[in-house]
Amino acid sequence: MPIEVDLINQTSALLGEENKTRVRYLQPKYPACIFFMGEESARYYDKMRHDLFTVWGESSDCLLYCKGICNTVRGKKGATLALYDMSTRGTGGATLTPIAVQNAVTAMHQQQEIFSDMSRNAVFCVLDTTQIKNKAEFSRRYRSISQIRTIIGSNIISMLIVILDDAGQLKSSRFSREFLS
């Protein structure tokens, strides 16, 4: 089974779709936000948006698609997370403040005809590891996910989608041993 199809099936199962026949245009269960962590991950936006449209039809247009870029500030520990609206990508992506993200989530909760359950928010983070060179860089991007969770608020169901290199592994075995130890 192609990775994209398997990913859609796993995503659909996570969101609790009740119709398991994979008929087109199922309804997403929860309001959902998809965050592409870094420029490398943002390359998957078009494909994921197309695949979600295949499953959820126009309902997929109501989801929030963002690019998250970790910025390190000299002299400070940690990193800040800059968020960009992927739906305005043709114009470079409008910067989103945390309040703008919260407002978008609130707006999704007003669309009860699209989402069958408003009790939770689904958050998907896509992380492409193919260009990550060390443990510190991976850790910085991974920790930025907690910033997203803080922005979205409580009652979150989340999924991290990690994209590996063509061999299906982290960039180097040394990096893997370092990170996993």
Image (tube, grey):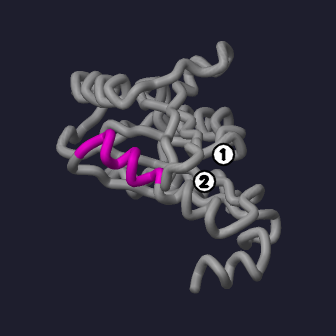
Instruction: Identify the residue under disc 2.
Output: 127
CA–CA distance between discs 2 and 1? Answer: 6 Å
Q: As displayed, is residue 167 above or below residue 109? A: below
Q: Position of residue 130 (x, y in %)?
A: 75, 59
Label 2 element class: strand
In the visual, does 126 lie left or right of 2? left
Residue at figure coordinates x 59%, y 34% from the top left:
49
Q: Position of residue 87 (x, y in %)?
A: 56, 22
Q: Position of residue 162 (x, y in %)?
A: 60, 60
Image quarter of residue 112: top left
Residue at figure coordinates x 25%, y 27% from the top left:
106
Residue at figure coordinates x 32%, y 51% from the top left:
18
Looking at the rendering, the stretch of residues picked out in magenta corresponds to 144-153
In the visual, does 65 lie left or right of 178? left
Looking at the image, tell me whether mark 2 or mark 1 is earlier in sequence order: 1
Residue at figure coordinates x 46%, y 48% from the top left:
124
Q: Amino acid at mark 1?
A: Ser
Location of the C terminus (image quadrant): bottom right
Inspect this view and state whether residue 70 appears: no
Inspect this view and state whether residue 49 appears: yes
Q: Amino acid at mark 2?
A: Leu
Instruction: Identify the residue under disc 1.
Output: 41
**Total number of numbered labels?**
2
Q: Nearer the viewer, residue 73 or 161?
A: 73
Q: Is 70 within the magenta?
A: no
Label 1 element class: helix
Q: Decide: marks 2, 1 in contact (CB < 8 A)?
A: yes
Q: Position of residue 84 (x, y in %)?
A: 54, 28
In the visual, does 175 lie left or right of 126? right
Classify 10 Å Cα crowding around label 1: few (below 14), some (14-19), many (20 and above).
many
